[in-house]
């Protein structure tokens, strides 16, 4: 019997584990993939208070090692069900806890066009910092208009020969300072009011078709397409114990409790105004403190 079972080893989940372990609780963290979540792929973090600059890998690894050094148990298993009695079923085992914190984050949103899955790892990527170096001196494209897309384009501009930035609207959703930095780059080409509609190639991606608002098509020869159009939560398996909104994010009246007693939520997986590293670790600490308080009572 664990005091707290945490589903997800991103910043929110690992912060929950850190606080719970410091509270002398028996903690299990379950993670389907790698520790760190999305932040693991960030080239640089420069908006975290007190840290001028750190790579996402270093930040995630430091946090993971903190948890392990405190005696935290982390198992890389896929959770398939959470029951209202706080039992958690994975692809390997069933675990029992006095409380459960859901901190599964969100995954990359796909374009959902033909050949997208076929070319993943063969020219289609969702992580510029992971795969950008494979395309040094090549022609690449970034699809998206938020901070992630703009940061990806900036990162790739120092690696690739040229970078197309494709966005479906006239104005970007990301911070203006990134846009201004991109405008100063000589190898950045903006394609606004446009969307990627086709991916072409044989064994790997060779070109993309971009369609503008007038439905005019342009074929671009590119070696890679980096897709950065947002994220989707992974909460389907939790619907028996939580309520979700129309986008699938977990509803919480106060940002920590769910509809089921002793099942809590933290991080990007819940409905919230801002999804940032700072808000994820904040959620994680609050969820752990609330869980400890209520199981003690």
Image (tube, helix red, strand yellow):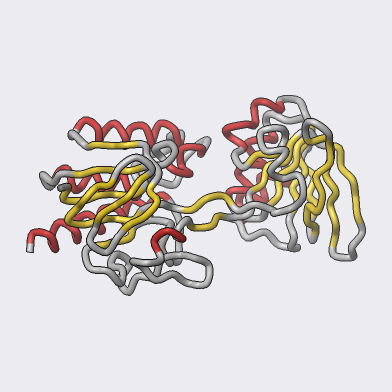
Residue 270 point in image, percent of width and height: 41, 63
Relative to residue 60, is residue 135 drawn left or right? right
- Residue farthest to the left, as pictured: 297
Image quadrant in which you'd find residue 203: top right
Task: Name which residue lies at 83% across and 44% down.
Answer: 208
Between residues 173 and 39, which one lies in front from this camera angle? 39
Residue 292, placed above or below residue 70? below
Rendered-image quadrant of the C terminus: bottom left
Residue 124, placed above or below residue 96? above
Relative to residue 6, is residue 141 drawn left or right? right
Residue 176 point in image, percent of width and height: 62, 55
Task: Name which residue lies at 89% across and 65% down.
Answer: 214
Relative to residue 8, is residue 18 drawn left or right? left
Residue 266, placed above or below residue 61? below
Task: Name which residue lies at 22% across and 54% down.
Answer: 288
- Residue farthest to the bottom, as pictured: 253
Between residues 214 and 162, which one lies in front from this camera angle? 214
Task: Name which residue lies at 67% across and 59% down.
Answer: 172
* Mark count: 0
Between residues 186 and 133, which one lies in front from this camera angle? 133
Residue 35 point in image, percent of width and height: 39, 37
Image quadrant in which you'd find residue 86: bottom left
Residue 10 point in image, percent of width and height: 38, 44
């Amino acid at each position: 019997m664990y005091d707290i079972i945490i589903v997800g080893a991103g910043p929110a989940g690992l912060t929950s584990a850190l606080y719970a372990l410091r509270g002398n609780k028996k903690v299990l963290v379950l993670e389907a993939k790698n520790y760190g979540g999305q932040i693991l792929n960030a080239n640089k973090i420069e908006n975290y208070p007190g840290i001028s600059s750190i790579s996402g890998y270093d930040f995630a690894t430091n946090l993971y090692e903190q948890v392990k050094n405190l005696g935290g148990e982390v198992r890389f298993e896929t959770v398939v069900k959470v029951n209202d009695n706080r039992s958690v079923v994975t692809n390997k085992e069933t675990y029992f806890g006095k409380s459960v914190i859901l901190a599964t984050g969100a995954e990359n949103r796909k374009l959902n066009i033909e050949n997208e899955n076929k070319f993943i790892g063969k020219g289609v990527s969702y992580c510029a910092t992971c795969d950008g170096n494979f395309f040094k001196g090549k022609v690449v494209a970034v699809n998206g208009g938020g901070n992630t897309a703009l940061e990806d384009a900036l990162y790739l501009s120092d690696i690739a020969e040229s970078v197309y930035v494709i966005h479906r609207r006239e104005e970007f959703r990301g911070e203006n300072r990134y846009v201004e930095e991109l405008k100063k780059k000589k190898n950045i080409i903006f394609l606004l009011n446009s969307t990627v509609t086709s991916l072409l190639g044989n064994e790997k991606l060779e070109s993309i078709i971009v369609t503008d608002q007038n439905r005019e098509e342009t074929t671009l020869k590119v070696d890679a397409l980096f897709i950065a159009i947002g994220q989707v939560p992974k909460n389907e398996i939790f619907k028996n114990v939580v309520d979700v909104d129309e986008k699938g994010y977990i509803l919480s009246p106060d940002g920590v409790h769910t509809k089921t007693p002793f099942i809590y939520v933290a991080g990007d997986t819940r409905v919230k105004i801002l999804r940032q590293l700072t808000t994820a670790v904040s959620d994680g600490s609050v969820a752990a403190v609330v869980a400890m308080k209520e199981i003690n009572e």
